[in-house]
Image (cartoon, grey):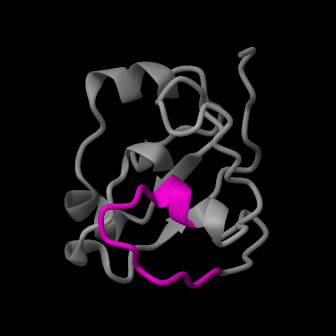
Amino acid sequence: MTHQGEAYRLPLRLGWSLMSLARRGKVPGIDGLCGGNCCCVTCHVHVDPAWLARAGQPSAMEESMLDFAGDVDAGSRLACQIRLTEDLVGLVVRLPRQQLVLGL
């Protein structure tokens, strides 16, 4: 869901990253400028609290990248680091107010 409340429903693609799915679905605000290499924060999302356990914990590298993102909370993740599995059917994420772009 975008920060403005616009919802997108996308078909599950097992094994894909959430970022790749969102980009293919043309979700605005998921830029993924680093191509999913966990070296920018342009795919920052907020995982809905009900989905946190299933989405998994961020790695140390992901957490260090999130230090550069704005609007970070307990559900902050990089969409490039969330691999889609059957356990994530119905996953709800929200976009931050704005994506920050680091110099690449």
The quadrant of the image that shows the C terminus is: top right
Is residue 11 a member of the stretch shown in magenta? yes
Query: Which residue is drawn at the image coordinates 23% and 51% (left, top)?
Result: 56
The quadrant of the image that shows the N terminus is: bottom right
Is residue 92 a member of the stretch shown in magenta? no
**Position in image of residue 6 (x %, y %):** 74, 78
Q: Quadrant of residue 87?
A: bottom left
Q: Quadrant of residue 14?
A: bottom left
Closer-to-camera residue (9/4)? 9
Is the residue 53 above or below the residue 98 in the image?
below
Is the residue 45 above or below the residue 88 in the image?
above
Is the residue 40 above or below the residue 86 in the image?
above
**Position in image of residue 23 (x %, y %):** 65, 60
Query: Which residue is drawn at the image coordinates 48% and 31% (left, top)?
Result: 37
**Residue 17 visible, this orientation:** yes
**Residue 78 visible, this orientation:** no
**Position in image of residue 88 (x %, y %):** 29, 73
Q: Quadrant of residue 95?
A: bottom right
- What is the chief secondary structure element of the magenta stretch? loop
Count of numbered tags: 0
Query: Which residue is drawn at the image coordinates 24% and 43% (left, top)?
Result: 57
The span shown in magenta is 8-21
Query: Which residue is drawn at the image coordinates 28% and 58% (left, top)?
Result: 55
**Position in image of residue 102 (x %, y %):** 71, 20
